Each structure stands twice: as structure tokens, then as C-alpha cells.
Image (spheres, rainbow, N blue to C red):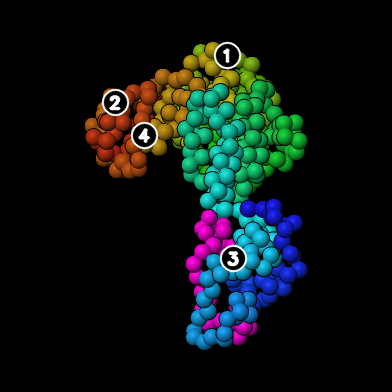
Amino acid sequence: MTPGTASTIDDVRLRRLLGAPGLSWLVDRARRRLERGQPLTGPVSLSAPTADQRMAAERLLGRAPGGGRSLSVRLEAVDDLLRRSGVSPAGLAAAVVALTGPVTVLGQARAEEHRAWAQAYAPLEVLADEVPALRPWAERLRSDGLVRRLVGTPTAAADLLGQVATVVRAVPVEPTVSLPAFASRLLGSAHALDDGTPLCTLTLSGIRALTGVPDTGGAQGRREAWASVGLLRDELSSTVLALNLRGTPALDWMADAGEPAVLTLRQLTRRPPRSAPPTVRICENPAVLAAAADTYGTRCAPLVCLQGQPSAAALALLSHLHTHGSRFRYHGDFDWGGLRIAAALLRRVPWTPWRYTAADYRTAVRTLPAGPPLTGVRAEAPWDPELPDALQEAGARVEEEAVLGDLLSDLG
């Protein structure tokens, strides 16, 4: 409702008649009725009115002084008074608008806000149409309330989600580039994707949905997610262990000594190995690689150790070796966490099991002393769908160290 009839209202008389401080409660009640879309009829009451409020109402309606614990005024009476006096020919509703400003009906406002929020998610809808794998992520963001918590208005949300879609659409980046340089080029600010910003939070969730990189939390987890699409937050913190790989002066020197090498993401993106072995074995735990170096030294087969979840450095190394012809054989812990690590790696590079099947697990359970109990949430094993069932049936973890002798027998 807008003051469209303001020209017919006698503003001076209206403020003298209805604008007194003692009648502000009455105007406020009438306005709230208008906001709720309710008619201005029936009584409105005020508990424990002051003498000024009671006197103002009696003067307005020309009635005798009253008593009691409350004060009641019928809105029809006020409406009729305003019309008959010519102060507000359109009645009480127009007078309230003239005194307090335009009135927005709350039901209508809520509907308009709902439409605005729906429109704010349009950039994600377009992106999900382009990349169907992102549809569950887009629907989750729409329903879980995260966007509303990060930004308070649909206008701000539309701007934010437009930037998120712009970034996710622009990855992966090849060759790798620093995250600040990428943000500066794409968004106009080197700090646009800094940790803790709403844009960083939502974009990282989209990148994880796109790549399958798990959210391991913390600064390291964020570095790994950025690096999975070619954006480097920190080139030195992400590392991978290798034994008897060659192709750079440093790797050649370590291989000649039969010693493990610690490779950083910086080394692997700037000076990757120039050669790739036909077969590379991959393990999950450093104890396996250390034992292989101790046992075989220079005679050990090429071996890479993930040290848990595949790091950006590990993925960079393995992707490079795969591109240049290496085949991979993988072994990890027989537990739910180990299966998740293996599946995450399989989504990035192909590998075949290295003593890492349901048959291998059952043999280990049958021949080894009882291991620690299996705990946690079940995970799947795309390379061997029978393996999760075998773990559940036996209910025991088998760590790589427990089958170290078998693994070493394949490396000499």
C-alpha cells in the first residue's frame, strides 16, 4: 500500500488528530493489521493505558472519560471519523500510510522473498545442467541452508553463487597455477578465494563434488582440494614418498643409493620425472616403503607411498607416470578407511589390486593372529565388490604391516 491518496489528505489536521503521542499505539495496531492483510474493523485494546493515552483516545472519539484496566477503540469508528471530517476521505488505511509510510503486506513480501531466493540459485542450476555430476551438490546447497547462513539476502546470494559457478566452471586448470594468480585473473582480486570467505567455502564444496576428493578438514585438506584441480595454495607442504623412481637428477641420486625420496608438489609440477617405469607398486603406509628400502635397497621395484589419503603431490606424480605409460598395482589397509583411500585413488588414476582382494583378505584373516576389530562405517570397493562383505563377515582389520612379508616378497 502506497500513499496514493496523499493529495486528498489534510496532513496538518491528520497529524493533529491522529498523530499525537498518546495515539501511537492505535496507529501501530492499525498498521500491523494492514501488514497482515486484515481488515481495519473491530476493536483494538491497550492494557494498562497511561492517562495521556486514555485522554487522547477520548478526545479523538469525543466520548466521556472512562476507567477500567484497559482501553478499547473500535477501528470502524476511527475510519468513519476520518472520512466524515474530510481529514482522510479514503479512511483509516490511507491515514496510516500517510503517517507511517508505505505498507507491505507480509504474505506478499514473503512470497516475493521466496521467489528472489529461488532466482538466486539460478547460476547453480545452469552449472548443474552443464555438468550433471554436480546436480546433487547444487540441490544440497539449495536445501541445507548454508548459503542463507553465509549471506543474509537473496541479492547477495545471487552474486556469490554467480562467482562460485564462474570458478567451478573454470577448473580444472592446466598447467597448474597459483591460486592467488587464478583468483586475480578470474575474479579481479588475488584474495577472492582466501580461506574463510563464503566464496572459498562454497567453491571448495563444488570442487570436491566435481573431483571426489574427500573433505579431510583443516588447511591441508583445503590445499589438497585446490591442488586436485590444478590450483596451488602451497607447493611445499604436500608431499609423496617414492623409492627407486628415476627421471630427475635428485631421483636418480636417491635411486642409486636405494633410499626413499620425499617429493614435494613444487618439484613434481616444475620438474616431473622424465621417465616412467612400466609398473609401479603403490602402498598406503610409510612402514612398507621403509622396510622395502631396508630389505632391497637399489634392487627394490619402483614403489610409491601415499601416506594415507592421496595428496596433491601423490596425485600429480601418479597422473604424470600414468600419462607416460606406467601401470599401477595398489595395496592398502584392509579396513573401511583403507577402502575409502583406495577408492579415492581409483577415481583419479587406474590401478589393479596388489594382494588387495577379498581372497587376499580371507587368507590373511585365516593365517594371521587375530587383529584389531573392524570399526566405522562400511565403504565399497569398486575393484572387488566382494571385499566389503568379506570384511563385514570377519569383522577384523588387517593392516599393511601385518602382511609385510608377503608384500616384500613381490618387491625384490
Marks 3 and 2 sit apart, C-alpha to C-alpha, by 80 Å
Identity, as a three-letter code, of the amino acid under mark 4: Ala
Q: Which residue is mark 1?
A: 324
Q: Which residue is mark 2?
A: 386
Residue 79's disc number: 3
Residue at 46% from the left image edge and 22% from the top image edge: 281
Q: Tag 2 or tag 3, which sits nearer the N-term? A: 3
Identity, as a three-letter code, of the amino acid under mark 1: His
At label 1, counting other C-alpha atoms closer than 10 Å, the crowd grade (few under 14, some 14-19, many 20 or more) is: some
Q: Relative to 301, say whether 372 is above or below.
A: below
At label 4, counting other C-alpha atoms closer than 10 Å, the crowd grade (few under 14, some 14-19, many 20 or more) is: some
Marks 3 and 4 sit apart, C-alpha to C-alpha, by 71 Å
Was residue 38 drawn as part of the magenta stretch in this picture?
yes
Q: Tag 4 or tag 3, which sits nearer the N-term? A: 3
Identity, as a three-letter code, of the amino acid under mark 2: Glu
Marks 1 and 2 sit apart, C-alpha to C-alpha, by 32 Å
Q: Tag 1 or tag 4, which sits nearer the N-term? A: 1
Q: Residue 100: horizontal and vertical position, in percent?
A: 67, 63
Q: Please, what secondary structure does the residue beneath circle 4 have? A: loop
Residue 379's disc number: 4
Tell me where the magenta segment starts and ends, as one range.
28-57
Q: Please, what secondary structure does the residue beneath circle 2 have? A: helix
Residue at 59% from the left image edge and 66% from the top image edge: 80
Identity, as a three-letter code, of the amino acid under mark 3: Asp
